[in-house]
Image (tube, helix red, strand yellow):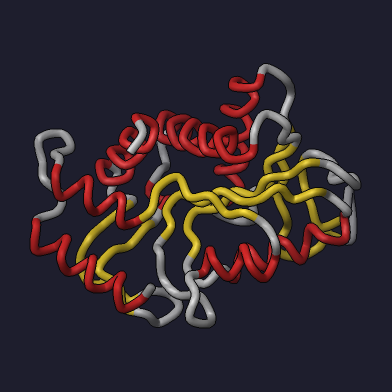
Amino acid sequence: MTPAQTAFLELLVSRQALKFGDFTLKSGRKSPYFINTGCFHMGGDLAALGAAYAATVRARFGDGVQTVFGPAYKGIPLGLATAAAYEGLVGRPVGWTYDRKEAKDHGDGGTFVGHPLTPGLKVVIVDDVLTAGTALRESLAKLKPTGVQVLGAVVAVDRQERGKGNKTAIEEIRGELGIDVAPIITISEAAAWLAANDVAGRRYLGVGDLARITAHLAAAG
């Protein structure tokens, strides 16, 4: 892993945004791990998170991104933090935008808040995790009428599990929607590193835990 990925993973486990155990996901699936970026609720956490996302945006999509889109609700602070950090990397203004859950028919109105979405604008979507890809599909459907150019998306962790069919959610998105999805880190990378390294003097994953996660991924991937 890169130093940026290692720093991000250490932040994930130290803030308990990545947990290991027995969990039932929103989709009803069982999982030996759970990711919740809502655990990042301090200013310093958000700055570090934005830096990790921005580094991945730049590495995968270059210096030409003009606006970062963060879908409501968890994507809103991610969009802001990523745009701020990416702006520092590329040395020019970078917009950020989010959507309303329901379109507003009074005041400024509309579906989106933030930087105006105009035809041809180069946009990257940021979100927390990608399980079945439903939230990303919804974001793309909302963005399509604006005419922006969606370069791709960045998510915190790739769970590496199946989407609607036999392919992983990321493979489905890439194939069906024609956009790239870049994770900061994959769950297999995270598990392997945590089984071999300590974070703040603690070993978060044992060899048996790693074997269990590997078996889960083999069955769910």
Position of the N terminus by quadrant: top left
In the rendering, at what x and y percent does residue 149 appear?
A: 80, 49
* Left or right side of 175 for 140: right
* Left or right side of 180 for 50: left
In the rendering, at what x and y percent does residue 213 appear?
A: 23, 66
Which is more toward the observer, 102 or 52? Answer: 52
In the rendered image, the vertical position of residue 176 relative to residue 20, given as above or below: below
* Left or right side of 167 for 29: left
> Residue 12's quadrant in the figure?
top left
Which is more toward the observer, 84 or 56? Answer: 56
In the rendering, at what x and y percent does residue 18 appear?
A: 31, 53
In the rendering, at what x and y percent does residue 42 appear?
A: 41, 35
Residue that appears at 9% across and 55% down: 206
Residue that appears at 64% across and 33% down: 62
Residue that appears at 61% across and 66% down: 173
Position of the C terminus by quadrant: bottom left
